Image (cartoon, coloured by chain):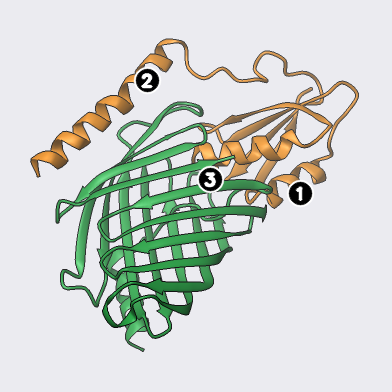
């Protein structure tokens, strides 16, 4: 039991320290916060509960020529899709991509 | 019939259930290494879609003195996406060969199959899972196992942070002498790396590592 307590304590300490450091640096910087423009899409998605979900969507959208970058906000459950100049995806295409990745689209809002 | 009853008991005892992710994103590869008091396993799989993965599974059951090599297929049967949570049901099955060093089976190779259900539910604070499996290794052995987990995240990190989970795992192997084992563990998850370390009530170490790319 003593060994277990020591192991868990060590792992928690190891795990907590880098998180504290990252928050001090101002948190996670998103790719699209700096460059959201007209026509970009804010997509409300159900089922976004962990980094793995965010990675799945980043990988999926990363294969699309139309997409410059995406940002996944796990707090608001919103995926912001930043398109390359002159390119876009329709709401139906966005919905299909996210559905195929295993998630559900709740709504899509285009940046004016 | 015995295994159906055990499964239902497990579902009742451990509900709401949850599990790890045996299927990755489309065209994703995953390496899973698991080590606990009973076995060492390695599973490498490729997901052609977000609903299926196929790969190679190696298992070394130390006390059973049995080594299993198999092709394993995992299928996402159903996903429930809610605003703040997600639940999944997977079917995990494999076919291959088992090799045993034990007693009368010294050097024996037999065809082997296994199948099981894995269920999970999680939000960003809580996690719970249930998993079972029936394994048939010809004349060498056949056995049933089930396990469940509950977990809590002491803090909720942003995307990209190191995520920490404190978990409790209960394993039930009806044929074993000590057929219930409880393991306390810590899960650390950052970027494409997931690491778990813990110790069970018999003082045996658990160490798991998952890498996705």
Position above or below: A38 against B76: above
Element carrying mark 2: helix
Residue lying farthest to the top in this orientation = A25
Which tag is nearer the camera, tag 2 or tag 3? 2
Q: Residue beneath label 3, please?
A: B83
Residue visible at 50% across and 52% down in the picture: B21
Q: Residue beneath label 2, please?
A: A18
Q: Position of residue A81 (x, y in %)?
A: 72, 30
Is residue B205 visible in this depiction of the protein? yes
Q: Where is residue B44 in the image (x, y as percent from the top left)?
A: 54, 52
Residue nearer the viewer, A86 or B115: B115
Left or right of B101 in this view: A30:
right
Q: Residue A40 carries which label?
A: none
Callout 1: 10 Å neighbours few (<14), some, many (20+)? some
Chain the render paints green: B
Q: Where is residue B159 in the image (x, y as percent from the top left)?
A: 51, 29
Which tag is nearer the camera, tag 1 or tag 2? 2
Chain where mark 3 sits: B
């Amino acid at each position: 039991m003593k060994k277990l307590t020591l192991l868990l304590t060590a792992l928690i300490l190891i795990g907590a320290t880098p998180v504290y450091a990252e928050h001090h640096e101002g948190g996670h910087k998103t790719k699209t916060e700096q460059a959201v423009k007209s026509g970009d899409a804010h997509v409300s998605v159900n089922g976004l509960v962990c980094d793995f979900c965010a990675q799945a969507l980043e990988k999926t959208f990363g294969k699309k020529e139309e997409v410059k970058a995406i940002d996944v906000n796990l707090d608001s459950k919103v995926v912001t899709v930043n398109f390359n100049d002159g390119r876009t995806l329709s709401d139906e295409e966005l919905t299909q991509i996210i559905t195929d990745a295993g998630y559900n689209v709740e709504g899509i809002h285009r940046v004016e | 019939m015995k295994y159906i009853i055990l499964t239902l008991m497990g579902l009742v005892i451990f509900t709401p259930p949850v599990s790890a992710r045996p299927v990755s994103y489309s065209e994703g590869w995953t390496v899973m290494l698991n080590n606990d008091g009973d076995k060492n396993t390695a599973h490498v799989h490729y997901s052609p879609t977000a609903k299926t993965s196929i790969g190679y599974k190696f298992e070394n059951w130390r006390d059973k003195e049995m080594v299993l090599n198999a092709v394993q297929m995992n299928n996402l049967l159903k996903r429930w996406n809610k605003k703040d949570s997600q639940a999944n049901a997977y079917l995990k099955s494999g076919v291959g060969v088992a090799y045993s060093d034990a007693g009368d089976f010294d050097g024996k190779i037999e065809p082997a199959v296994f199948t099981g259900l894995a269920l999970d539910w999680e939000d960003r604070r809580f996690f719970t899972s249930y998993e079972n499996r029936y394994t048939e290794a010809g004349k060498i052995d056949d056995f049933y196992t089930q396990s469940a987990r509950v977990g809590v995240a002491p803090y909720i990190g942003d995307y990209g942070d190191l995520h920490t989970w404190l978990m409790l795992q209960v394993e039930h192997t009806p044929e074993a002498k000590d057929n219930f084992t409880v393991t306390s563990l810590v899960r650390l998850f950052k970027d494409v790396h997931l690491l778990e370390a813990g110790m069970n009530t018999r003082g045996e170490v658990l160490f798991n590592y998952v890498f996705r790319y």
